[in-house]
DNA sequence: GGATTGCATCAGGCCATGCA
DNA sequence: TGCATGGCCTGATGCAATCC
């Protein structure tokens, strides 16, 4: 598909385009093969590289912005009072423009921003307004969702859309991906012909019919579409900066490696040895003295003489906080050998909770499991009554409303966000409660994958963190929301996105423009405040 | 038939709060 | 102040459906 190629080119850019030019004389089949091969090879690396390196045209602008951003970040560290002003700058600093943004638009937008910045610098109040303005500028192009099961008829429409999209892509990208897009067009034509006259159509129809007939069956060709009713809401809340990690180098949000686990276990044993807490048992895992000593450390509060032991133990684990080390140690020592839950165990949990309430520590001791695992097992038990499988149209609509409302609420009032770990800064837990039929992970996944262009998920980049200042902009939803207001390219570019669905990124990327949401977002990127309605 | 995608599950990290 | 606990959210991955 042209889009696929374009994406890759956008990222892999010139090299790829050059190759295509060189291949001019090769017959189409060979060309196609080559492209396919090259695409596969390049998609992972090239896209990332390209996104980070950018096309040259964009580079001038975005790198300049990066510089500004970095400087501002430094300033921010030095001067907390200038936070509000820095917010804008830092966001710009995140900027790593986007391939698909045409240069003209980008430059124009940047100029506007510069002007705006200049203006804002003099007046903090203005800066605040500007932030609000950003929110208001987020003309949410998302509205209620209609799910269409694709039939042959529909696929015809989609083809039209694709053609339109590619034409628009030509205009959009200008010379940037011209050659490649031509390749894309060829491929599209093939696709069109292929679909229209395909022998497979019967098969597809059959499948589609089967899909239609069963509500529970998976959503074949299911597409999210948008109505003409567009609700506009600001999104200032998540623009808030989170505290920069004062510990700088500390690892947060990343799983413990086997090495780190080993370090913790070793550190605990070292502590026991140094303080003469155990006997001379040869086998530390079997020796009662060692077991007792470890147990004492795990319950150090009951043993005043062990006060501060975790401070000492945690010193052995670089880049982890005391708390983090402490919690990880508890998991390591308390988790059951068997990670699977039997029906009996789940039954026990349910019964226990009904009788005694959430005494996870006690229950964990009884079952020989970690309190956290017990707690989550109970959550799953509760979730078992919820629906599974394909989402209905009503559920999608309800979910979308709830997400919308959540954002609106956040925009209009200071909502207490305890953890700073809300996915996309949206309270999926609360939404799940309101929706009643789906668990929060399901809402979250469905919400972020269905209402958001897939390219926003990214495979590489810095490790995800829950406290990094950039985090609010690293997720798909945010990126999409920003994109819907034309702000995407001044926020985190894909190259700085954290991995959310990383393993699928190369594949996802390859199908970017096949996504209806993508086309809509692109449409809105061009400055429109409305989204085209479903075809 | 391999590739892609959606969904569900399991595991665990971080936070706020309570308590001694 | 340091530990203990519950709450909430994220990451990784397997399976099955669907696509190409």
Image (cartoon, coloured by chain):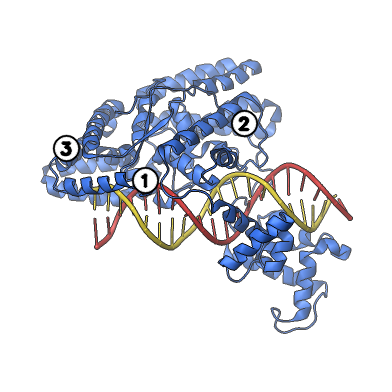
Chain colours: A blue, B red, C yellow
Contact check, label 3 and label 1, Cβ < 8 Å = no
- Give the label on residue A93, or none: none
Drawn side of residue A225 relative to residue A191, left or right: right
Per the image, the residue denoted by label 1 is: A215
Contact check, label 2 and label 3, Cβ < 8 Å = no
Coordinates of residue A327 in the picture (x, y in percent): 69, 58
Coordinates of residue A1 in the picture (x, y in percent): 24, 41
Instruction: Classify residue A61 by image quadrant.
Output: top left
Q: Is residue A242 visible?
A: yes
Give the answer, above or below, for where A122 lies relative to A155.
above
Q: Is residue A14 visible?
A: no
Which is in the foreground here, disc 3 or disc 1? 1
Q: Kindly indicate whether the residues beneath marks 2 and 3 are on one polypeptide chain.
A: yes
Q: Kindly indicate whether the residues beneath marks 2 and 1 are on one polypeptide chain.
A: yes
- Mark with earlier residue (2, 3): 3
Per the image, the residue denoted by label 3 is: A189
- Mark with earlier residue (2, 1): 1
Q: Disc 3 on helix, strand or loop?
A: helix
Disc 2/disc 3 C-alpha distance (Å): 46 Å
Drawn side of residue A52 relative to residue A362, left or right: left
- Give the label on residue A240, or none: 2
Residue under the image location 54 percent in, 51 percent down? A385
Instruction: Classify residue A282 by image quadrant.
Output: bottom right
Residue under the image location 21 percent in, 39 percent down? A152
Coordinates of residue A471 in the picture (x, y in percent): 56, 39
Badge 2: chain ID: A
Badge 3: chain ID: A
């Amino acid at each position: 598909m042209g889009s696929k190629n374009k994406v890759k080119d956008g990222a892999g850019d010139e090299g790829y385009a050059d190759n295509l030019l060189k291949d001019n004389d090769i017959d189409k089949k060979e060309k196609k093969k080559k492209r396919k091969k090259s695409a596969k090879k390049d998609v992972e690396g090239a896209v990332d590289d390209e996104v980070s390196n950018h096309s040259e045209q964009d580079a001038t602008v975005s790198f300049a912005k990066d510089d500004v951003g970095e400087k501002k970040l430094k300033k921010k560290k030095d001067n907390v009072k200038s936070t509000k002003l820095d917010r804008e700058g830092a966001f710009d600093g995140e900027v790593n423009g986007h391939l698909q943004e045409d240069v003209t638009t980008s430059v124009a937008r940047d100029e506007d921003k510069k002007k705006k910045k200049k203006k804002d610098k003099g007046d903090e109040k203005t800066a605040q307004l500007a932030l609000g303005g950003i929110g208001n500028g987020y003309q949410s192009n998302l509205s209620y969702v209609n799910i269409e099961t694709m039939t042959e008829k529909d696929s015809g429409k989609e083809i039209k859309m694709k053609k339109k999209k590619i034409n628009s892509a030509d205009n959009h990208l200008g010379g940037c991906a011209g050659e490649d897009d031509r390749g894309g067009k060829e491929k599209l034509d093939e696709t069109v012909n292929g679909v229209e006259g395909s022998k497979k159509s019967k098969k597809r129809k059959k499948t589609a019919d089967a899909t239609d007939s069963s509500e529970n069956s998976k959503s074949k060709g299911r597409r999210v579409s948008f109505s003409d009713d567009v609700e506009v809401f600001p999104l200032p809340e998540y623009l808030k900066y989170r505290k920069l990690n004062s510990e700088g180098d500390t690892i947060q949000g990343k799983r413990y490696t086997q090495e780190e686990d080993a370090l913790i276990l070793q550190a605990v044993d070292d502590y026991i040895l140094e303080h003469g807490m155990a006997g001379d048992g040869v086998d530390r895992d079997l020796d009662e003295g060692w077991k007792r000593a470890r147990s004492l450390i795990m319950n150090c509060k009951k043993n005043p003489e062990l006060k501060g032991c975790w401070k000492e133990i945690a010193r052995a684990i670089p880049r982890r906080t005391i708390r983090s080390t402490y919690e990880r140690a508890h998991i390591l020592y308390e988790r059951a050998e068997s990670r699977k839950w039997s029906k009996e165990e789940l039954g026990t949990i349910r019964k226990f909770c009904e009788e005694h309430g959430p005494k996870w520590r006690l229950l964990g001791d009884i079952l020989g499991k970690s309190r956290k695992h017990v707690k989550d097992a109970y959550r799953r038990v509760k979730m078992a009554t919820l629906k599974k499988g394909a989402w209905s149209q009503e559920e999608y609509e309800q979910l979308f409303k709830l997400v919308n409302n959540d954002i609106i609420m956040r925009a209009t009032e200071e909502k207490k966000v305890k953890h700073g770990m809300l996915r996309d800064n949206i309270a999926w837990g609360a939404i799940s409660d309101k929706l009643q039929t789906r668990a929060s992970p399901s809402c979250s996944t469905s919400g972020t994958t269905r209402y958001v262009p897939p390219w926003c998920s990214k495979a590489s980049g810095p490790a995800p963190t829950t406290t990094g200042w950039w985090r609010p902009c690293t997720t798909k939803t945010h990126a999409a929301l920003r994109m819907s207001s034309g702000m995407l390219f001044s926020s985190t570019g894909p190259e700085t996105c954290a991995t959310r669905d990383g393993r699928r990124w190369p594949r996802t990327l390859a199908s970017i423009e096949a996504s209806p949401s993508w086309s809509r977002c692109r449409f809105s990127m061009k400055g429109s405040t409305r989204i085209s309605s479903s075809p």
